[in-house]
């Protein structure tokens, strides 16, 4: 499967539209559509964001063997490396999908700040401030 086909596969498997992916990448929909049609290829910055959006590795996107993964010669043997099921965004609402796709492209510090700002403690603090300002 070619890169453009894999992009379409991961996008549709994630339940996202071309417009939604393009919005997160900061591109026009037509530019992203060119990626999926094979007319152009994404730059490295866009590739990195796509990996985060689809929650996949570079090797999954490029369909290359991961050099850090050991292979087992016995096909019936269990791999020594535990495969962790990655959470895809199939069954989420549109709003949840949008939140997650934007969250995945944030830096670790930005993710931390966002999570802290929406934590239950932060929410309770805002409610208390609102009540005290009303009195």
Image (cartoon, rainbow, N blue to C red):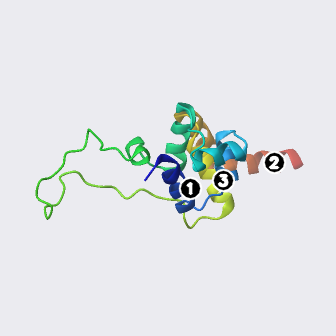
Residue at left 54%, top 64%? 90
- Distance from Cα at disc 3 to Cα at disc 2: 40 Å
Q: Where residue 56 sits: x, y (%)?
A: 44, 48
Circle 1: is it few (<14), some (14-19), or many (20+) Cα within 10 Å?
some
> Mark 3 or mark 2, which is nearer to you?
3
- Distance from Cα at disc 1 to Cα at disc 3: 8 Å
* First-in-chain label (2 vs 1): 1
Residue at left 59%, top 64%? 92
* First-in-chain label (3 vs 2): 3
Circle 2: is it few (<14), some (14-19), or many (20+) Cα within 10 Å?
few
Vertical comparison of 113 with 2: above or below: above
Residue at left 69%, top 39%? 26
Q: Residue 18 carries which label?
A: 3
| Residue at which label 2 appears | 130
> Label 2 near label 3: C-beta < 8 Å?
no
> Mark 2 or mark 1, which is nearer to you?
1
Q: Residue 3 carries which label?
A: none
* First-in-chain label (1 vs 3): 1
Q: Where residue 19 sits: x, y (%)?
A: 70, 52
Q: Where residue 123 sits: x, y (%)?
A: 68, 50
| Residue at which label 1 appears | 11
Circle 3: is it few (<14), some (14-19), or many (20+) Cα within 10 Å?
some
Q: In this view, does 114 lie to the left or right of 56?
A: right
Q: In which quarter of the image is residue 83?
A: bottom left
């Amino acid at each position: 499967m070619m890169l453009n086909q894999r992009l379409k596969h991961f996008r549709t498997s994630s339940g996202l539209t071309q417009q939604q992916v393009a919005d997160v990448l900061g591109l026009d929909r037509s530019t992203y559509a060119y990626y999926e049609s094979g007319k152009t290829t994404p730059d490295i910055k866009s590739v990195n964001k796509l990996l985060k959006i689809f929650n996949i590795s570079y090797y999954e996107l490029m369909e290359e063997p991961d050099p850090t993964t050991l292979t087992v010669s016995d096909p019936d043997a269990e791999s020594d490396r535990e495969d962790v099921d990655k959470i895809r965004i199939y069954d989420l609402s549109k709003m949840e999908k949008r939140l997650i796709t934007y969250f995945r492209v944030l830096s670790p510090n930005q993710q931390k700040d966002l999570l802290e700002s929406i934590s239950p403690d932060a929410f309770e603090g805002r409610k208390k401030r609102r009540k005290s300002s009303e009195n």
